[in-house]
Amino acid sequence: MSTVEIATIERIRIVTINRPERRNSVDRPAAELLIEAFLAFADDDTVDVGVLTGRKVFSARAQTSKASRRVTATESPISATAQWAPLDSG
């Protein structure tokens, strides 16, 4: 069973964090899978909406029980490819 599950229903991509035993805290492997999932979503013209959810509960934190270090902007695969657009206010 994967720590990140991906499903597509019609034109909606659903990405689910599947670590309920850890209240879906995001550790490094889960973070890498989430990055891959959303990079794939950004490149997929067959879906219009992305939804991030968690199995049983939603995650609001990173897992801090393991030693980790912050990823700098130059190390992140998202920093070079992310394109943010303002929301249309009406």
Image: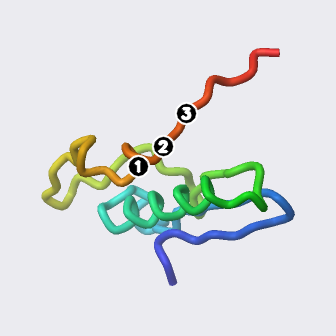
Measured Cα–Cα span from mark 1 to mark 2: 5 Å
Q: Determine the residue positioned at 63% across, 23% down.
A: 86
Q: Is residue 32 left or right of residue 18?
A: left
Picture coordinates of residue 76, whole percent (x, y): 31, 50
Q: Secondary structure at mark 1?
A: helix
| Element on which disc 3 rests | loop
Q: Are marks 2 and 3 in contact (CB under 8 Å)?
A: yes
Residue 62 sits above or below residue 19 on the image: above
Q: Residues within 10 Å of mark 2 (few under 14, many from 20)?
A: few
The C terminus, quarter of image? top right
On residue 82, the disc is: 2
Circle 3 crowding by C-alpha within 10 Å: few under 14, some 14–19, many from 20: few
Q: Are marks 1 and 3 in contact (CB under 8 Å)?
A: no
Residue located beneath label 1 in the image: 78
The answer to whether residue 47 is above or below residue 29 is above
**Could you tell which of marks 1 and 3 lies nearer the N-terminus?**
1
Look at label 2 and name its amino acid.
Ala
Q: Which residue is at 24% across, 51% downward?
A: 75
Residue at the spot of label 3 = 84
Expressed as whole percent of the image width and height from the top left, the position of residue 84 reads: 55, 33
Q: Which is nearer the eye, 4 or 20?
A: 4
